[in-house]
Image (cartoon, coloured by chain):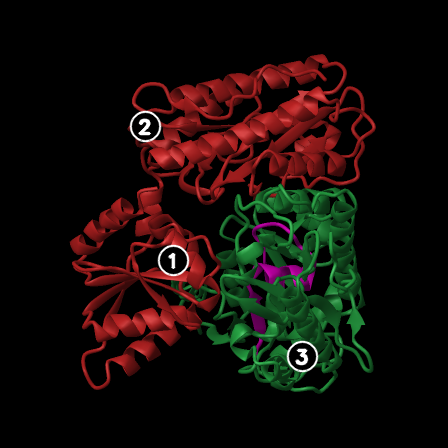
Chain colours: A green, B red
Amino acid sequence: MDHAGRRDRLRAVAGGAGLDAVLVTNLLNVRYLTGFTGSNGALLLRADSDDVFGTDGRYTTQAGVQVPDLELLVDRSTVSALATRAAHLGTGRLGYESHDVTVDGLHALERVLGEAAGGGAVPELVSIRRAVETLRAIKDGDEVEALRRACTVADRALAELAAEGALRPGRTELDVGRELDARMLQLGAEAPSFETIVATGANSAVPHHRPDATVLRDGDLLKLDFGATVDGYHSDMTRTLVLGHATDWQQEVYALVAASQAAGRAALAVGAEVAAVDAAARDVIVAAGHGEHFTHGLGHGVGLEIHEAPGISALGAGTLAAGMAVTVEPGVYLPGHGGVRIEDTLIVADGEPELLTLTSKELLVL
Amino acid sequence: MDHAGRRDRLRAVAGGAGLDAVLVTNLLNVRYLTGFTGSNGALLLRADSDDVFGTDGRYTTQAGVQVPDLELLVDRSTVSALATRAAHLGTGRLGYESHDVTVDGLHALERVLGEAAGGGAVPELVSIRRAVETLRAIKDGDEVEALRRACTVADRALAELAAEGALRPGRTELDVGRELDARMLQLGAEAPSFETIVATGANSAVPHHRPDATVLRDGDLLKLDFGATVDGYHSDMTRTLVLGHATDWQQEVYALVAASQAAGRAALAVGAEVAAVDAAARDVIVAAGHGEHFTHGLGHGVGLEIHEAPGISALGAGTLAAGMAVTVEPGVYLPGHGGVRIEDTLIVADGEPELLTLTSKELLVL
């Protein structure tokens, strides 16, 4: 992955904001900018000089392998040590992540900077807001490739379980969820992307139902919302199946959600307002009289986090750009009866978006 | 779990600090105090009245099931809505978690409190520090039971893989790690406790080696550091095995670490200084001339987090109390050759500590 190129893009942002250096503390942002995957690391990015990567002694070896191109600073108090370095380098304006640093963390930074400055000028702390998250919203080729692999693992896990008859009446939601998770690990996932949702029968009407001991029954809907993490990148897919045979209302709701989802995918275009994309899918459901049963936003960005920029909802602001990875996931939930959600992960592109989750969206009767 | 009792203990702490209410935002602390397991929730705990639990619309149903005893406030801006409620209730001094709330979060809280107060008195925000984490360090019976089950899953997963011959020359670290993870899920874990460490040969000398494509070879050490999460509670265990046959140096290092680990366990007593517990184990290794090869602290608390209070290290402060769940995990790492770590999870008690990780600590030759 092109970590140096990413750092240079952040350097340009920092330069534009008149910052001499930026202290990046959000661990996913650090990973994005350096490749480091340990549980403690931070980056001092300098406007016109070499950057310094900090971690503690547990990760000396790992940092040498993953971040070979940066100066390494090893210290138990990693962030404080990097701040001290920044002060000693004569940093005037020091950017920091005010959405990540806690109140206690800020006080510690101020104390350390004051001490390191001696009697001299103390660096001024300036929030860079979500500058790195904004960069992260546009995926580069390596990131798309990781997302593609993550989606493939999820596709395969579901296909294998379906082929083996694991999704059959008599089993519990928990059985199915654990098997999906285990299968994704066997297929190369580092972890599930989030707590896998398995919801059958009336539970499928709960958008974020946690799998429990509910038994799968003939004629029930079965909603599966799950994903795999590969190289840190998350896939996200929902499919709703039906066990044994589909009733008329199940088929009608399914067809409605599928039409909405297709409209949402068709609206994914470079320059599209996110609220308009939401509306394209939502209008289909509203027109059918089910607007009140679609209770959440249409989708979200996905990458090193399962939920990241951009949000795609009625209240969202901003437009789509080429290289954004997003989900499209409308649902119709009929309390007490059941619900259907269909979700894909896609890459926004000039022309057609690229579909990464390739499992069929025909109503599967198992 | 006795969430009401836990809230009453925090209420006593808040009362002692002269607070009218506390806004708990750390999600694990919220879980500890309410039982809520979703990804967004907060608690307004009131000094002498009923508490309010807040979440967003995704979790209305789940909150009704998991937190039936508290008033439920559903709002997309959960924390802001609870702060507004606190202001409307005439809260004078409002405790908050300054180690959890970000700088941006504090500014949002201040803005919301000012708006909600109208022209009246604005509630004063006062840090409660790690008050909830301090309570969490002492486990109650339900928590110990969850930890016991988490440890049992890890014990069984390792026993099954060893019995099936999965830990044999020719396989890779990644193979073994993924099988351990998958087996723990099949045995009822929600997730691995952390990124499973599988380190063979010279890699075993790296304390936190990430499993890679290194192939297990006859005569190599194989260090496995892993755990299962059950009902949110984490187990943590390390065992070091040897493949095929043990050389003299491997046996010597193993015996040394085992003696150190036994000394550490023996030092776990109510009232013991954590630094003295570390020293009890470390002295054994230092006396054998390997002090420089034991490069980390002896152990840490474990519970809803894999690392929590108390830390057990040479620089640690404080004493052990009955009901603390801790690890004891000395290691000797010989760079370029290999390393041995032996780790258990135990409960500090009057008299003998209770050992939760029951896998044998004899040097296993597979």
Q: Is residue B288 visible?
A: no
Residue underneath mark 2: B272
Question: Which quadrant would the N terminus of chain A be assigned to in this image?
Answer: bottom right
Report if residue B17 lies within the magenta region: no
Task: Say what amino acid the circle numbered 1 marks.
Answer: Gly
Mark 1 lies on residue? B64
**Badge 3: how crowded within 10 Å, few (<14), some, or many (20+)?**
some
Whether residue A217 is situated above or below residue A3 in the rendered picture? above
Using the image, name the chain to which the residue with label 1 belongs: B
Q: Chain of mark 2?
A: B
**Labels 1 and 2 in the same subunit:** yes
Residue A248 or A220: which is nearer the viewer? A248
Nearer the observer, disc 1 or disc 2? 1
Residue at screen point 21% across, 86% down: B119
Q: Amino acid at mark 3?
A: Ala
Find residue B56 and report its horizontal and vertical position in percent: 44, 67
In the rendered image, residues at marks 3 and 1 fall on the same chain:
no
Which residue shows up at 56% across the image and 31% down it?
A: B153
Does residue B303 appear left or right of residue A89 in this picture? Answer: left
Left or right: where A22 falls relative to B209: left
Question: Magenta stretch?
Answer: A19-43
Q: Nearer the viewer, mark 3 or mark 1?
A: 1
- Residue nearest the observer in this picture, A356 or B366: A356
Q: Residues within 10 Å of mark 2 (few under 14, many from 20)?
A: some
Where is residue B162 drawn, in percent x and y? 69, 22
Query: Residue A12 — which label?
Result: 3
Q: Is residue A174 above or below residue A197?
A: above
Q: Is residue B357 above or below residue B69?
A: above
